Amino acid sequence: MIESMSLDRKCLVEVRVGKSHEKVHPAWQDDTNDGFLICYDVNLVFDDQSIFLVQPCEVETTGRYPGLGLSLEKIEAVNLPSLLKVSCLPMRVEQVVQTDCLGEDVINQYIIALENGSKIVIRHVFPPMTMGIKFEQENA
């Protein structure tokens, strides 16, 4: 789980993604993943040289199958090749909101609210162990 305070007020300078594709397989397409770039990992790069890796994961739940969550880990170096175009970067993180958009009683979505009102949404999507990332501009 994200420790919200660890990203609040940091200046995000770059978002990088690993292997990605524009659409989910038609069998899994629904409104929970519409408009997302589908990927397997994301690097968040900050101006203080800190780098965080976000990946989909399974979270143990009592008496049920594991829930679909997200992991956040501080890493030493950028490890993903593709720069995601986020027009307003660099920009300070105003707030990180963690939600359960899939209704599985685990955190499976991060909404990174930037100080200009734009948002970067990272969410676990189907099929399991894939994520989606989407940039939402303030006036969009």
Image: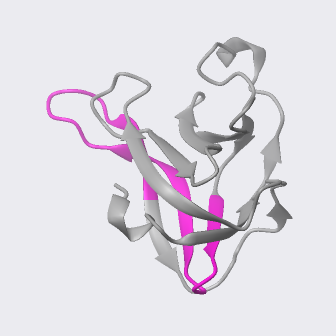
Image spot of residue 9 (x, y percent): 47, 68
Picture coordinates of residue 99 (x, y %)? 38, 35
Residue 34, relative to residue 22: is it above or below?
A: above
Is 74 on the left-hand or right-hand side of 63? right
Magenta highlight: main SS: strand
Q: Does the magenta-highlighted stretch encompass residue 62?
A: yes
In the image, taking residue 21 as reference, residue 99 lies left or right, namely: left
Task: Name the quadrant containing residue 123.
Answer: top right
Identity of the residue drawn at 54% across and 54% down: 55
Q: Which part of the image, by quadrant, shows the N terminus? A: bottom left
Between residue 22 and residue 115, name the one nearer to us.
115
**Residue at 59 percent of width and 20 percent of height:** 32
Q: Which residues are magenta?
A: 42-71
The structure's colour scheme is one colour
Magenta segment includes 66: yes
Determine the residue positioned at 83% across, 40% down: 21
In this view, which residue lies farthest toward the left?
62
Of 132 and 25, the residue lying toward us? 132
Q: Residue at x 41, y 44 (%)?
A: 97
Q: Is residue 109 visible?
A: yes
Residue 100 percent across, percent down from the top left: 37, 31
For the C terminus, the image quarter is top right
